[in-house]
Amino acid sequence: MRMPGFIVFVCTAALAASLTACSGATRPQTGAGGGAGFDVTPTSPAAKGELDSFTWSLYAEPYTLDYALAYDYPPNTVLANVCEQLLRVTPDLRIEPGLAVKWTRPDPRTLVYTLRPGVKFHDGTTMTADDVVASLTRQTDPATGSPWGSAFKNVDSVEKTGPLEVTIRLGKADVLFHELLAASPGTVVSAASLARQGKDYGTPKGSLNCTGPFSLEKWAQGDSITLRRNPAYWDKKLVPKSASVKFTFVEDPAARSNAFLSGAADGGYMVPATSLGHLRSSGKGSLLFGPNTAAANLAVLDFHGPLGNLKVRKALSMALDRKNIVKAAAGGVGVPAKAPAARGAWALAPEKTATLFDTLPEPAYDVEGAKKLVQEAGATGRTITLATSSLAPEISVVANAVQAAGRQIGLDVRLKPVSPDAYSGIFVDPAAREGLDLVVTNGYDNTPDPLEFYQYLRTGDFGNYGKWSDAAFDVAFDRANSEPDPGKRAELTAKLQEIALRELPVIPVYEAPYSVFLGKRVTGAPTGIAQLYYPWAATIGAAQS
Amino acid sequence: MTRFLLGRLLGLAAVLFLTSIVVFGAVHLAPGDPVTFLLHGRPATPETVAALRAEHHLDDPLAVQYGKWLGGVLTGDLGRSAQYHQDVTALLGSRLPGTALLVGYAALLVAALGVGAGILAALRPGLLDRAVLIGTGVATATPSFVTAIVLVSFFSVQLGWFPGPGGGAADGLGARLHQLTLPALALALTFAGLLARVTRSAMLDELGREHVEVARARGVAARTVVRRHVLRNALGPVVTVGGTMLAGLLISTSIVETAFDVPGLGSLLVQSVTAQDFAVVQAVTLLSVAAFVLVNLAVDLLAPLIDPRLSPGEGSS
């Protein structure tokens, strides 16, 4: 048996992990545009005509098209055009009626949804309350393995109370749950199809039977996904301008950038930060920035180590050179973060954002002051371990910046490289956090409500990785989560923001806008993160009439 | 001959069995937990995690897990991909054509470019020979992912002659081959450079032999000399090396598939290793090993046809 002497290079594909999506975080609309050389607008110029088809590039193949398992950019980007929720997030990050025409809250623990009549699934059958009940309850079954299960933690029952009426009873008031019905948890699919397909539902073998403006025509595993216009779509405002959409998957950032430049792909969201400059100056299309709810932060994982001391957390925050981090990690498109939940996450009550967020001070950058704080805390020379990974380029950029900051103020920051998969594991498995003090996170909110972000800092929440606990915070959270009025809820959420900024369980780093590249042939796409739950492909059409 | 074949096939079975144990062990000993990948790093309730572990038999002892997998394989069931929620057989079926077409195309290019350049260099000493030597030097030294980037920026982005990555598989064989030209070139160039050098030195060896001198002195036409005396004898080492290269192509294809976004087994393997998708990693690895062994076997069987002095099993070197 002859063995050849070839050396194999193993390249790891960048997989987006949950709270550390590949590239792109965000900054929402400021009155005066975006800031340093970029503008943030919720939509691109309107389409001038119809198209037969356009090709859209995803940075990875969806691992599923089952709404109950879809919790990442690639699957939700496709599903947003095929399946719909009871509520809908609009491009400027508002919540509007979707498959539910109205809802009432007879008491804080009861939600009643009235369904839109005459809505047809792709197979021609009519949507009823039975479909809603089946779609929602499926996510609460552990056997489904849904990452959305925790969104339903306060749900006692989902019942049909009329042919077109569904009543949800809660164990305790939970406004966030209602808002999440504008995201994956509120998706409605045909109960008959679910029952018929069983395990194959949402796989390349199965089919989707939903109500959206496009239906799933073909999923050629590993190659592409094709959607076809749904002629019977109920929302006449969003009748697709293109007869079909073809999704392709390009994991390699350089190859993806070339796909845009060569015209092989007409467009794509989440443009790799490393290609921003190149694509902007290429003349092959336009690079646009939209509202985003994501932010890059440093989450403290161990409050028993040196970071258990608030002075050390403050010092680390003060020593971060955020402006340079934005340059290196986000191609200069972004701003230092003032708070752990991004400005874009405050879209629900825009009139409140100015008073509750914009008035926050810019994060301080004061190395000398930080050094003093470390000395006061008696932490000079202590070791802080930070996980780093090739999962997304910004992770190592931020990690290196933290190490440099630590060196300047007398903290010995050690980087622990882990595989992309192990990095995702940090957010799921407490055992994977052993020995780590800090982790770079880059999560997005599914709703335009900052409360969604702050829920992860409650005592005992699955997303509270460092087991931080603050009684005042928990009380304030419950109050905010039982306040249905968005304006008042924003006020209450500001309390949470205040505590988080005072105690720094999470150190804010930067926020970058959402990005989309549009080739010369197409226009009309929403530009922001709302594309995850809004039928964004319906408005894309020809750039020239 | 039959005994020889039987022995080799038994050897193949043994190699596959050992490989499956090694790969199984490697995937399971690697740090991390498949469940974290299944959840894509989303926080999940303990009940959900428990349900997922049960569904993928992650709580069984390793030996039991391996036994279950092996039992499945022997009955033709390669298991289910945890990452794609579908049968591995279906996954392989959808990816195999892409890789087969790419590797086949690249192999043809390696043979044509490598053997062609090698023969030219051997028969035309001087400037042409030197040019081939420099060209093959560059080709062998350049890693395929660099070649890929250069080819795409020049031929797809600048000139637009070939489609770039990210357009999805084209319909129809002609369009598909056109689309695979750049990836196949990127994959082939390194190997073609090596093969050209092997061909050149084998030819030069033969050209300097006594019987060639004699044939020339007798006034046999140059073309006949080259064809009957030089090429035929030089072919032995060329085929042997070419066979190992075909196996090398199968391995290098993952890099090119990733760079050009070709839906094949190579890119699937890279993704599945990252995701600890054990069933897929096993299947793709075993398939590659089997292909590798079978290609070697084919080369050994071809050797005596080219050079009757050899019996099967002793390739010329």
Image (cartoon, coloured by chain):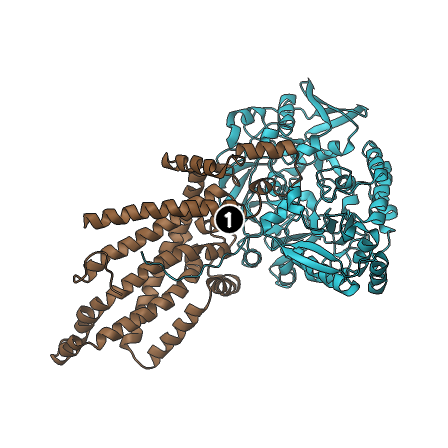
In x, y percent, where is residue A189? 60, 29
The vertical placement of B194 against B89, above or below, is below
Q: In this figure, which residue is indicated by the disc labeled 1?
A: B273
Q: Nearer the viewer, residue A412 or A483?
A: A412
A60 lies left or right of A31: left
Secondary element type, mark 1 = helix
Host chain of mark 1: B
B110 lies left or right of B86: left
The vertical placement of B301 against A179, above or below, is below
In x, y percent, where is residue A40? 74, 53
Residue type highlighted by circle 1: Val
Q: Nearer the viewer, residue A397 or A543?
A: A397
Quarter that holds the N terminus of chain A = bottom left
Residue A29 visible in the snapshot? no
In x, y percent, where is residue B91? 45, 41
In x, y percent, where is residue B144? 46, 62
Q: Residue furthest left?
A: B218
Q: Residues within 10 Å of mark 1 (few under 14, many from 20)?
A: some
Chain B drawn in what color?
brown
Q: Residue at x 22, y 73 (%)?
A: B206
Q: Quadrant of residue A385?
A: bottom right
Callout count: 1
Q: Residue at x 76, y 59 (%)?
A: A322
Q: Which chain is cyan?
A: A
Q: Residue furthest top?
A: A162
Q: Nearer the viewer, residue B280 or A55?
A: B280
Q: Quadrant of residue A192?
A: top right
Q: Nearer the viewer, residue B125 or A287?
A: B125
Residue A147 visible in the snapshot? yes
The vertical placement of A358 against A133, above or below, is below
Q: Residue at x 46, y 54 (%)?
A: B254
